[in-house]
Structure formats: structure tokens, C-alpha cells
Amino acid sequence: MGETFPRGRIVWHELMTTNPDAAVPFYRSVVGWDVMPWEQDRSYRLWTMRGDPCAGLMELPEEARLGGAPPNWMMYVAVPDIDQTMGQATAMGGMVLHGPQQIEGAGRFVVLSDPQGAVFAVMRSPGEQGGHDGPPKPGEFSWHELATTDWRAGWRFYQALFGWEKMEAMEMGPMGVYQMFGRKGQMLGGVYNKPPDMPAPPHWLCYAMVPNADTAAASVTRLGGKVLNGPMDVPGPSGDRIAQCMDPQGAAFAVHSTPRVAKARPPAKPKAEGPKAKPAAAPKAGKPAPKKPAPKKKAPGAKKRPVKKVAPARKRPVKKAAVKKR
């Protein structure tokens, strides 16, 4: 499966929160997701769009809370060999925070932190891997952003693990470089050094594609969440808009819209490409270490997705009870 395995594809995203029931109406209004229980474990729910599972939802385990993990979104990346990836990550200064763990019918996964402390997960499903290549659809995750303390070191770590490609770079003045990356020519996200006034430790922030980022941000505020940065234009001529937010339970996430996806503009002129440049200047985006996810974000298309335990954004390993689904 060497050449056909989608190594480096972001295949799943998962929200671990203190109040899953409250999260349902919030994200339904902000992003447009529906929800359904996972048949193999009804305590684990699936966010769906047009009937297709696109992310997971579960309660933040007590042991995770005691270990300091806040509500968070985590992204899962496909790798062909969990043990080999785990060994490679630790050899480069990363840490194993949970697992490896096998989930019947969903596959094997492990939660890791990179050398700077940002948390993410890797997984290998027994059959076809989740997600898809190509531009994200509404309701899927369209961008993944790493705010860290040393973006160059962080980039080397992830490039070695996943084979991601360095793409465009953008100068942000005093904030330095915003380096974009992708896979097979498709942009997936960006990495940058977080500013001194950003309170959160190194973390991944996942952007969900919505019809209108401004409308979504207004819903966040109306429903008790916080808009941390934006809504604002994405640098460049694309016409994309984004807003970085926090839900009522404290999980950080972002929304992203493009003219081609906004239903409010049918006669849209030239189609803008997927989010090319993602602003990294989100001085206040207090994001939990995981970014619990997921494309340029790709959203999983498989029906059952991994469920994992989110570890705190710090480098101190925190055990979490992980539930997986595929």
C-alpha cells in the first residue's frame, strides 16, 4: 500500500468538550452540522453534513480534565505505520500523550505532541482511510494553522512525519513569516510564530468552511461563544473571509468562507481558489493545545472516525480515555 496510502492526509477532527449536549445546537447554528450517534458506541456522536460524517463529538474524560486538558478540537493525520511514526516523532523530540490504542472497526491511533508542545493525533484505519483529496466542501475543515514558538523547527518535524510540501510564504511584518503547506499540490494550512501576547501555548487551530464567515461569527456571539479575531479578509485577491472563535465551553476553532461557497452571491464572478493565505495574526486566539483537526482542511468522508483523547497543549503527557470511531 506504500504508494497509494494517503500519508499526511488529515482524515478526522474531534471535539472533546465538557458539555456535548450544549455543543450540538451551537455548532448546528454556526457551521450547519447535524449530529447522529455512532452505531458502535452511542456515547460518541458524529457531526454530519448532507448525511455524511465529517467530525466527532464526545465528552472530555474526567482524567483529561484532571490532567489539565481544556475542551478542544483535535486533528487526526493518516500514517501507514503507527509504531514507526510514534518512534520517529519521539526521536525528533515529540512526546506520546495517549496510546497507541486500537478501536474495533475504526483502526489504531496515538496522540502526540510536537517538540514545541502542540497536540495532534495520527491514525491508521483497517480499510480505506478517511477524508479525501481536493478542495474542501461546505461543512468540512478547510484550513489547519499551527501557532508555535519556532515555526521552522515545527515545519521540519511535520514535514518529516507526513511528507507535507512547503508552498507559498507570506511576510507579516513584525510577526515574521507565515509559511503555507500542502499535500499533492492542495493547500492544507500554515505555520507561524505566535506573538508574545497570545496567551495559549503552541497549538493547532482548525477552520470549518461555512457559507458566510460574518454570519457564523455573529451566531457565535449570539449563542454565548467569543469571537477572538475577525471577521476579516484573508490577504490576497481571493475574497475569502475568516473569524477565529471560541465556543461556550472554551474550545477554540475558526470559520472560513469563500465567494464560491457563499450562497448569498449566486452570480459570483471568477471563482476564488480555496483559502490560499490564511492569516496567522490572531493575537488572541486562545486555542487549546490540540486543535482538535482537521483541511486546507480536508474533512473525512468515511463513516466511522477515530475518537481520541485530547491531551493538554503542554508537553506534559496527559492520559485520556479514548474512544474511536471510524
Image (cartoon, helix red, strand yellow):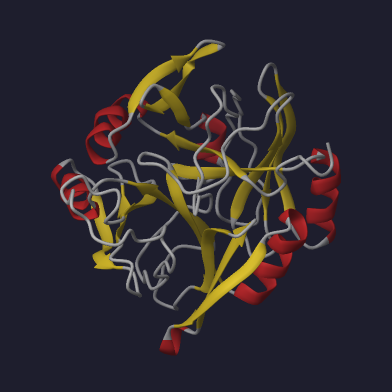
Report x, y in % for residue 133: 57, 44
Looking at the image, is 71 positioned above or below residue 119? Answer: above
Q: Is residue 56 visible?
A: no
Q: In the image shown, does 299 or 133 lie closer to the viewer?
A: 133
Q: How many marks?
A: 0
Looking at the image, is 155 positioned above or below residue 41? Answer: below
Looking at the image, is 230 positioned above or below residue 179? Answer: above
Left or right, residue 198 beside residue 83: left
Question: In which quadrant will I find the N terminus?
Answer: top right
Left or right, residue 112 beside residue 64: right
Report x, y in % for residue 262: 24, 49
Report x, y in % for residue 17: 41, 35
Rendered residue at 32%/31% (across/down): 33
Q: Quadrant of residue 132?
A: top right
Rendered residue at 57%/33% (across/down): 63
Rendered residue at 54%/13% (across/down): 41
Q: Is residue 223 visible?
A: yes
Q: In the image shown, does 169 or 27 lie closer to the viewer?
A: 169
Report x, y in % for residue 10: 59, 45
Left or right, residue 143 beside residue 160: left
Question: In which quadrant will I find the C terminus?
Answer: top right
